[in-house]
Image: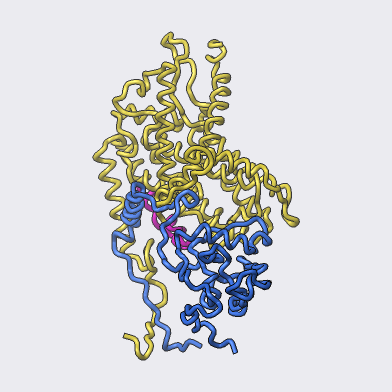
Amino acid sequence: MLELLKDQFTFSVILALVIVGILNGAVAYCIYFERKISAWLQDRVGPNRVGPLGLLQPLADGGKFVLKEDIIPANVDKPLFLFAPFMALVLGFIGFAILPWGGSVDLDGDGVVDVIAQVADPGIGILYLLGIGGLAVYGVVLGGWANNNKYAYFAAMRATAQMLSYEIPMGLCILIVVLTAGQIRLEEIVLAQVGNGNIWNICLHPVAFIILLTTVFAETNRTPFDLAEAEQELIGGYHTEYGALKFGMFFLGEYAHMITGSGMVIVLFLGGWHLPWIPGLQPEDVSIGAMLLKMSVFGAKIAVFLFFFMWVRWTLPRFRFDQLMRLSWKGLMPISLALMCYTSVLVYAGKATSLAWCLGGELGVVFIVLAINAMRTAPITGRQRNMPAITVHKPAGAP
Amino acid sequence: MIEEKDIIIVDEPDLSTTEKLYLPQVVQGLRTTFKHLFKKNITVQYPEVKREQRVENYRGVHRLNRDEKDRVACVACFMCQTACPANCIHIVAGESPWEDREKYPVQFDLDELRCIYCGMCEEACPVDAIELTPEYDIVGRSREEMVFDKEKLLAVFERTKDVKPRKNPRITGYAGTGDREQSSGNTEGEG
């Protein structure tokens, strides 16, 4: 049995099954916690009728999704209509494959590393995640298109434009990390952060971290960037015509995507499974126990991120579309581009892991961008000064 | 038509520097919502917990009162049925088996779904037999079930007589016991 497990392929298959099993449950409970957290933030109770503390609510919801009538409207593009929810769900899930859950593992305790606790470790590393992230919008786009519904189509258009705009700063931020680590494989990026005196990339590049976080919000279609499902304007957005299990799959896909996105941010900026100074969580701890510990630390970090996602969702209102575009093209993109250039200069000068140089540069770049922004007639945020002047009329008796 | 001169266009205020950065505002918002995470929630778990009665004269489901001799107080005068703006009361009168009144309701149907809970039946009643109670959570599985008959309305009285005592239980005499004066005002407009 152990000999069989020592084969990376067998280990990967088992790990994949376990992780997908756990994450399916986690995704279902994400919906429960989404509702609970929204309730708590609004001084309410939230679901509490189904089972103790309402904990069986996801099962009830799932049962409802399964039992509802599965309607395919008359004028939809049927193959695409059926394909889109699968796309959303599958692309949400396959990103998990390359997340480094628990580092290297020595299964039989002979001091030789047998396998890595990662379903797949392709040489392209982070590019795979980027590719999956880019494809994930197809669930939304195909759904919106196949619906044959103009509102859903609008949603699909919005999602496409949004995805195009936010992929760029996201890619640039990822490049900053890749430049700093000199590595493209996720496990190596984690190890590089540990190797750099336990200084995670968030300490070196806080601004890049914030930009990446913002783009992840946009990539996962979460508030404040959930224009693709702006129900006030677009009915349900891209899933207007979807019902029953197909709607449920879109729903699950969104949460799966959130987990993948937060996993990516954690690996790139927050040290993955690593916590400084705690024994068992260091790269040299390779026992099975250490692997489980690392996995739970990684899971806990993801849970914190998911809470943050939900917290933000129930705090911030949605951006207007022009604001969304302006923020990405005029705000995030120049800043991340400048940061990327600065980081490459640092790498050339051999100062890429120096805290003072990185932080100073980040602050300088942000300051310069803000100064340029202040001088512009059309600033990134706020009212555009190049809009036509407003004449103020007052009625005769007005104060 | 709104005149051009009556329109006030309020200029969107310019954002301050911190507001233009978004992030300080975002953090402020997050702080506000985070505080609410620990606040006591204000939800009332309705079927188990009920809010205290806040309005004395809340107009809920009707009841038919009983007099002190445990008879139905209604004298089938049709005043409520006449006054009802929603036409939800239907009375069938019969000859009273008792000495002190001529008629009594053989059948008294009140459609709680049709009723608009205006309270005019209560005002019209010369003997204070029909009253609206503070009870608001009435349910039924069919429309027919929501047409309350005499027994049902009397049952409401049994349920609610402690919560809301009958307004004037002494008014029972129809044949000149002297108490008639008090409700004489209600007969205005009948002719």
Q: Can residue A333 be seen by looking at this rendering?
A: no
Q: Which of B2 and A142 is in front in this view?
A: B2
- Asked where in the image residue B65 lies, by quadrant, the reply is bottom right
Magenta region: A317-339
Q: Position of residue A36 (x, y in %)?
A: 45, 45
Q: In which quarter of the image is the C terminus of chain A?
A: bottom left
Q: Is residue B100 magenta?
A: no
Q: Can residue A15 be seen by looking at this rendering?
A: yes
Q: In this view, does A46 lie to the left or right of A199?
A: right
Q: Main secondary structure of the magenta part?
A: helix
Labels in figure, total: 0
Q: Nearer the viewer, residue A250 or A10?
A: A250
Colour yellow, chain: A
Q: Position of residue B188 (x, y in %)?
A: 53, 87
For the point 41% across and 40% down, the residue is: A305
Colour blue, chain: B
Q: Where is residue A60 in the image (x, y as percent from the top left)?
A: 59, 41
Against B116, residue A77 (above or below) is: above
Q: Which of B91 and B41 is in front in this view?
A: B91
Q: In which quarter of the image is the N terminus of chain A?
A: top right
Residue furthest toward the left? A356
- Asked where in the image residue A385 lies, by quadrant, the reply is bottom left
Against A256, residue B78 (above or below) is: below
For the point 48% across and 69% down, the residue is: B169
